[in-house]
Image: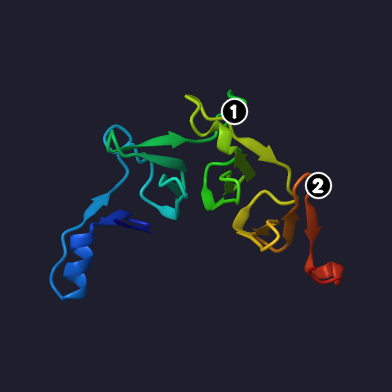
């Protein structure tokens, strides 16, 4: 299936729908909109979709992170909870990245989170908050040496290197990016 996000919901196109579109025929596809009690999707504004190497579908929205539960045909929701240690540090999930180990990195309007691969099967997921210079994480990328690059709203780039502190780079520093 092809999953396409818009601000009006999540469109799921089956292989048959894709074949129909290529042939110029009308395609039947499913649209999931915000319906916390039904589909489990808490918001229709889809910002990011990621399929991990184990086949899991993760969806970032303006109001949280969602994991597709195929057997139940609904989403499991994760959002910030000030009363819960290990919840997301922001509500708006802007970007997602899976690293070389299978860890899930989540960029939100409240900062950066990591979900360790060994925690993915736990009944209650616990997200680790990674300290970064700016709270509004807009993009994540991994380079060939497995460093995680973090882009922020309003400028600035940081890099996370395994077992080292996050390094920050700003245009006004005029030192250039490594």
Give the residue furthest to the left. 25
Residue 135 is left or right of residue 103, and the answer is: right
Q: Which residue is mark 2?
A: 164
Is 10 placed above or below 88 here? below
Secondary element type, mark 1: loop
Pinpoint residue 72: horizontal percent, then vertical percent.
28, 33
Q: Residue at x 13, y 72 (%)?
A: 25
Name the one closer to the observer, 139 or 56: 56
Task: Name the element at disc 2.
Answer: loop
How packed mark 1 is, by other alpha carbons closer than 10 Å (few <14, some 14-19, many 20 or more), is: few
Q: Which residue in the structure is indicated by mark 1?
A: 82
Residue at the bottom extreme of this rendering = 24
Quarter of the view holding residue 1: bottom left
Q: Is 71 left or right of 171, judged from the image as shown?
A: left
Colouring method of the image: rainbow
Residue 154 percent coordinates (x, y): 67, 62
Residue drawn at point x = 75 percent, y = 48 percent: 162
126 or 64: nearer the viewer: 126
Quadrant the C terminus occupies: bottom right
> 176 left or right of 90?
right
Tell me the residue at 16%/68% (across/down): 20
């Amino acid at each position: 299936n092809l999953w396409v996000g818009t601000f009006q919901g999540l469109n799921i196109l089956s292989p048959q729908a894709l074949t129909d579109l290529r042939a110029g025929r009308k395609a039947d596809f499913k649209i999931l909109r915000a319906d916390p009690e039904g589909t489990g999707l808490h918001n229709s504004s889809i910002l990011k979709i990621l399929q991990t190497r184990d086949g899991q579908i993760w969806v970032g929205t303006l109001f949280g992170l969602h994991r597709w539960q195929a057997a139940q045909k609904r989403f499991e929701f994760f959002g910030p909870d000030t009363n819960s240690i290990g919840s997301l540090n922001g509500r708006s999930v802007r970007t997602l990245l899976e690293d070389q180990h299978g860890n899930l990195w989540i960029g939100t309007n409240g900062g950066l989170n990591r979900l360790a691969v060994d925690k993915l099967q736990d009944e209650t997921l616990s997200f680790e908050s990674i300290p970064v210079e700016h709270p509004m994480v807009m993009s994540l990328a991994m380079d060939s040496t497995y460093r995680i690059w973090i882009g922020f709203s309003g400028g600035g780039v940081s890099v996370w290197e395994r077992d080292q502190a996050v390094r920050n780079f700003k245009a006004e520093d005029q030192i250039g990016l490594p």
